[in-house]
Image (spheres, rainbow, N blue to C red):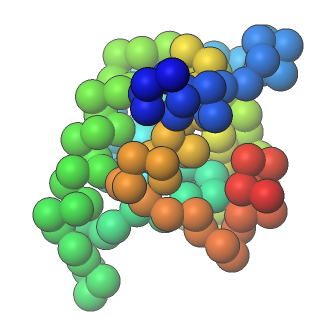
Amino acid sequence: MGIISLLISLISIPFSAYGALQTTIIQRCYDGDTCTAIDGEKIRLACIDTPELKGRRADPIPAKKARNFLNDLLVNEEVYIKRITNDRYGRTVAELYKNDINVQELIVLKGYGKIYKRYADQCEWTR
């Protein structure tokens, strides 16, 4: 089994686990953990943290790589969305799934982000 096949098998979930979830189409991703759906919904990817583009904690080179990866993966794509809560900025905190793949877990496995330990309990895959 190749490494890609192994990664996909590790992060795949059975159809029945997300088949009842709603779908949305991603318009664009601002950074490696924040996207906007075509209906304007701002989505903060749950349980992960990626480098910041701006601000005092900015790390622009890896931040742009994470953003570009997420945009290449999700823009104009229909994804399943598992809404968890809203954050203090009014964004929907959610897990996204594309083609049987947990997007957050893929970001961590590819090295574009890390598990956000403070909120990791919101996502079963982090346990």
Q: Residue furthest front?
A: 1
Q: Residue at x 42, y 41 (%)?
A: 35
Question: Based on the displayed image, in which of its 4 quarters is residue 16 positioned?
Answer: top right
Q: Position of residue 85 (x, y in %)?
A: 75, 51
Residue 107 percent location from the top left of the image: 45, 46
Residue at 62% from the left image edge and 26% from the top image edge: 9
Residue 73's place in the image compared with 87, above or below, is above
**45 left or right, relative to 94:** left
The number of numbered badges drawn on the structure is 0
Residue 96 in view in this figure = no
Q: Going by the image, does 125 lie left or right of 98?
A: right
Q: In the figure, is residue 36 to the left or right of 102?
A: left
Relative to 1, does residue 31 appear above or below in the rendering? below
- Residue 13 placed where, x, y %? 73, 24
Residue at 21% across, 51% down: 65
- Pick whichever, 105 or 58, lies toward us: 105
Q: Position of residue 93 (x, y in %)?
A: 64, 50
Q: Quadrant of the C terminus?
A: bottom right
Residue in view at x 27 percent, y 28 percent: 72
Q: Residue 119 occupies which quadrant of the picture?
A: bottom right
Of residues 108 and 26, which is closer to you in this image?
Answer: 108
In the rendered image, the vertical position of residue 93 relative to residue 35, given as above or below = below
Q: Can residue 29 be seen here?
A: yes
Considering every residue shown, the one lying at the far bottom of the view is: 56
Quadrant in the rendering for residue 62: bottom left
